[in-house]
Amino acid sequence: MIWQAGRHRWEFPRPTLLMGVVNVTPDSFYDGGRYATPEAAVAHALELEREGADILDIGGESTRPGAEPVGEAEELRRVLPVLEALAGRARAVLSIDTQKPAVARAALAAGASIVNDIAANREDPEMARLLAETGAGYVCLHMQGTPQTMQAAPHYTDVTAEVGAFFERQLARLAAVGVRAEQVVLDPGLGFGKDLEHNLRLLATLESFRRHQRPILLGASRKSFLGRLLGVPAAERLAGSLACAAWAVLRGVEIVRTHDVAATRQVVRTLEALKSRGGC
């Protein structure tokens, strides 16, 4: 199985890819404001790379539940200086975390190779056309609703079946516009329009998404469902996040998105060593 992101190519099975989170925002749920200047964001990104990040995911708009939308110009103001600086310094592959096609286009021109898109449920084909034109990698994430509405009253009859059906539809829609399957990875969207039981069910049934024959990305890092499960704030959710990363590796997930690259790398590489020796 291949993931092609512009000039970058990964062939699976291989060691799990680690995607480090770089939020250039004042209001993200965990590290909002900590890296809001370009200088701080670049320094943080390079530190994540030193810790073992294969991909750096740069975002200029918070997607936490209830977050207010950010205008296109402001999002570009936040992310472009970071991308431009990293394009000349980082060895890790750059990803833009955006739902706006115009921001994605500018980010790809500035050095990004991947679009991480929470709004893969949109009807407008503009983002798909951009992907077909550029050959960029694409993270197709499932979300019910929008960041403003997604946690109001999420409802599913069968969350695993409905997320799987969404992936089938989106892969077909992307293909119809000219996006190759090799460009796409699938993210079940933990925390994006799911309650605690929905998230736990998706984690328990990750292997069901193998039928789509695309790599799976999992982003559980520090998320609020862990807070509800464990009764702890975001600053105390590292252990729960690492448990999810470990579970993902044991279920064959190809990419783990994390705020805590160094700790996640230790867990992931240890489990991979055990798996390779028949220990798991």
Image (cartoon, rainbow, N blue to C red):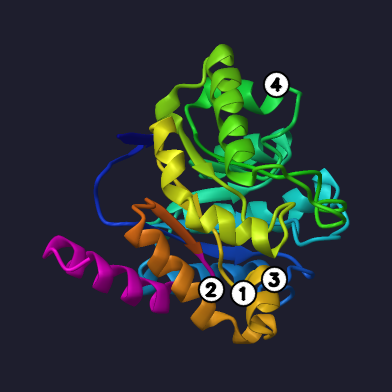
Eyeballing the image, is 131 above or below 10?
A: above
Magenta stretch, overall SS:
helix
User: Residue 216, image x and y in percent?
Assistant: 44, 46
SS label for mark 1: helix
Query: Does the magenta segment cover residue 45?
Result: no
Q: Residue at x 66, y 28 (%)?
A: 127
Closest to the observer, 81 or 138: 138
What is the CA distance from the residue labelled 2 to the residue labelled 3?
Answer: 23 Å
Labels 4 and 3: the sequence-earlier one: 4
Name the spot of residue 58 as percent of width and height, x first.
59, 56
Residue bounds of the magenta highlight: 258-280
User: Few, some or many C-alpha atoms within 10 Å of disc 3 (few <14, some 14-19, many ≥20)?
Assistant: many
User: Which residue carries the number 3 mark?
Assistant: 224
> Looking at the image, which is closer to me, 108 or 121?
121
Please report the residue visible at 56 percent of the width from the left and 64 percent of the height from the top. 220
Three-letter amino acid code at the position of disc 2 = His
* Residue located beneath label 1 in the image: 40
Residue 82 appears anywhere in the view: no
> How far is the residue under mark 1 from the one under mark 3?
25 Å
The numbered mark, 1 or 4, whose residue comes first in the sequence reads 1
Instruction: Kindly identify which numbered label has been placed on residue 125.
Output: 4
Answer whether labels 1 and 3 touch (C-beta < 8 Å): no
Q: Nearer the viewer, mark 4 or mark 3?
A: 3
Q: Amino acid at mark 3?
A: Ser
- In the image, residue 60 lies at what x, y percent? 71, 57
Which amino acid lies under the numbered mark 1 shown in the image of this protein? Ala
* Left or right of residue 113, residue 274 in this image: left
